[in-house]
Image (spheres, helix red, strand yellow):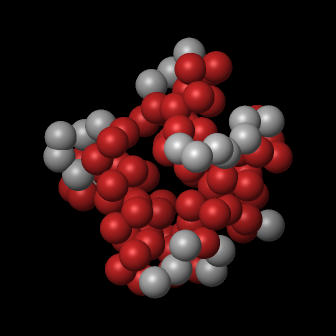
């Protein structure tokens, strides 16, 4: 993942309420899919999918990264939005090194 999407994601995570309303996981997922479509780059969700597979052993299936995130949130006993923010923060941190 290059630097521009990383910076955009950091801002999105800290100011999510500025980008989506009402604030819930489904709207966040729609925003992220639209963002990727707008920049014509699927690296964010591809990297997110692989990161969850590698670090949390939750595979992606026909429901894609969204279903993968929901299954992980059930395992962690969190809301999908909490899980998304935690995983994306970790992904950004790991790709900075």
Front position in the image: 69 or 89: 69
State the residue lying farthest toward the front.
62
Question: Where does residue 68 sit, x and y in percent of width and height?
Answer: 60, 39
Question: Do we see residue 87 in this rendering?
Answer: no
Front position in the image: 12 or 65: 65
Q: Is residue 83 above or below residue 87?
A: above
Q: Is residue 33 above or below residue 4?
A: above
Front position in the image: 6 or 46: 46
| Rendering quarter of residue 81 | top left
Residue at 36% x, 80% y is 38
Question: Where does residue 25 sit, x and y in percent of width and height?
Answer: 36, 39
Left-right relation of 94 to 63? right
State the residue lying farthest toward the bottom.
40
Left-right relation of 51 to 81? right
| Rendering quarter of residue 48 | bottom right
Question: Where does residue 44 sit, x and y in percent of width and height?
Answer: 57, 66
Question: Do we see residue 6 in this rendering?
Answer: yes
State the residue lying farthest toward the top.
77
Residue at 46% x, 84% y is 40
Front position in the image: 91 or 42: 42
Quadrant where the C terminus sits is bottom right
Question: Where does residue 50 sit, x and y in percent of width and height?
Answer: 73, 55
State the residue lying farthest toward the left.
21
| Rendering quarter of residue 45 | bottom right
């Amino acid at each position: 993942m290059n630097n521009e999407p990383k910076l955009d994601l950091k801002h999105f995570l800290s100011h999510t309420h500025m980008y989506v309303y009402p604030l819930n996981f489904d709207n966040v997922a729609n925003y992220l899919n639209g963002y990727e479509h707008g920049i014509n780059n699927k690296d964010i969700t591809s990297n997110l999918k692989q990161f969850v597979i590698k670090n949390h052993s939750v595979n992606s299936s026909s429901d894609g990264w969204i279903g993968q995130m929901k299954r992980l949130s059930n395992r962690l006993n969190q809301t999908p939005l909490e899980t998304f923010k935690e995983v994306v923060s970790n992904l950004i941190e790991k790709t900075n090194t």
